[in-house]
Image (cartoon, rainbow, N blue to C red):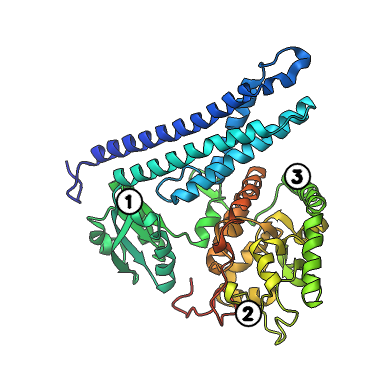
Amino acid sequence: MKNPNGERPLAQRERERRRKEWGLTGLKVIHFLGVVALFYVFWLLFRYGRLDVRHNRPFRYVYYVTIGYGALLLFFHRVYNAYLLGYSRIRSLIFSQAVSQLFSAIIVYLGVSLAWQQWRSPMPLIWMWLAAQPLNVVWSTLCTRLYFRIYPPRRTLLIYRNAVDKRRLGSLGGKPSGQLYRITEELKYTGNSFEEIRSRLVGFEAVFVAGVSSSCRNGILKYCQEECIPGFFLPHVGDVIMQDAVHIQSFDSPVLHISRKMIRPEYAMIKRAADILVSLAGIVVLSPILAVTALAIRLYDGGPAIYRQVRLTKDEKRFEIYKFRSMRVDAEKDGVARLSTGEKDDRITPIGRVVRKCRLDELPQLFNILKGDMSLVGPRPERPEIAEQYYRKMPDFRLRLQVKAGLTGYAQVYGKYNTDPYEKLEFDLLYIHHMSVLTDLRLLFATFGILFSSESTAGVEEGALTAMDGEDEEGEP
């Protein structure tokens, strides 16, 4: 029996999809085991096992160390999306795998050296890391090409409510995912019911959806599941909040409980302890860089090296954030608060361009974290003047202030400087409703990945004061 699209039976298409997924999973396992095997060989080849000479068991712990390396590698692969075929560029895959292997090797080296109280040359692990890079290049290149061969471009329908929805959905179809989903038709949603647009879905192999009503969206969701086609839905704020809902067992009917986010006491203590330890260690280790940067800014124009600015944190509490000054002293002489327009902003000094490019301007915030004004991970603190503009168009923006502001977070890692405020809110709510020690750890390591991305510091459009400027009422999310 064929489905309404006139294509192969659903069960047959599902079997083919499973075979493809299992095949790709096998290729990922082969790469992972190959890298772990390299680690094992180099560990034995350079006789790191002899560190345990006191017990005369030179190779006993090589298995445990290798297992530990493999576990770390799995963790970092997830942090950096090292196997995200089809959605990541080849160079991004290679970079993610290289960084994952590097961090895993460093942690293993430090852990073993501290445990056995012997410091040996790290060169064997460096050679191991270098030997893994050709494997990363070959695997990422071949598997990406294979992926696009077995997954040809899908005919995709784009359903949107307004210009903002269309722009946000358009980014999903950019490279490299544009090779997977070819938007062949667009449908502007005008309040139609699902029954009215169901016939328009027939014949498409994927659907991008934003801005439709809940009842219509539920119909599209069920249709995608029934027909085994991928659906991509931009969430509403309520959708993100519902992810943290707790199922209450005391009622005859399924009930989901939602309340304002309350941080568990044990997590709050761990988070604060980590903030103090990491910020203090960062200040000590980075003190030479802090000193040189401050001196360079001071010598350039004689102005202050540190720029203080009022920001908002939990429950709209105000505090002064510390940043290295990257703009002229009179950057806001007119008294108007505005975001940077990026590289084209003439207020940025030559020293400031280097400081911003290397993300050095953020380092003084370690003192804010040590004081308790901020946390390592949390929503990015906004200026009160700019936040007030967002509130007028989007009152829900206050929901991101349920927790303390942070140096890094979902919005900082997965968004950009000029990310739409509505998207920034959704990113922050994702973090707020998934807060945990593991989530914080993943975001801290993921932050290293954006240090090499110029997109994360892209400014707003020239002449705009905020990332929301230029959107009319129809464009408001």
Residue 39, can we see it?
Answer: yes
Q: Alpha-carbon neighbours of circle 2 within 10 Å: few (<14), some, or many (≥20)? A: few
Looking at the image, tell me whether mark 2 or mark 3 is earlier in sequence order. 3
Closer-to-camera residue (280/248): 280
| Residue with the mark numbered 3 | 270
The residue type indicated by label 1 comes to Cys
Q: Which residue type carries mark 3?
A: Ile
- Residue 245: x and y in percent read 56, 50
Please tell me whether mark 1 sits on a helix, a strand or a loop.
helix
Which residue was labeled with disc 2?
A: 346
Q: Position of residue 322 (x, y in %)?
A: 77, 66
The residue positioned 67% from the left and 61% from the top of the image is: 359
Distance CA(mark 3)–CA(mark 1): 42 Å
- The answer to whether the residue labelled 3 contacts the one labelled 1, judged by CB atoms less than 8 Å apart, is no
Residue occupied by mark 1: 224
- Left or right: 356 in relation to 299: left
In this rendering, the label closer to the viewer, 2 or 3 = 2
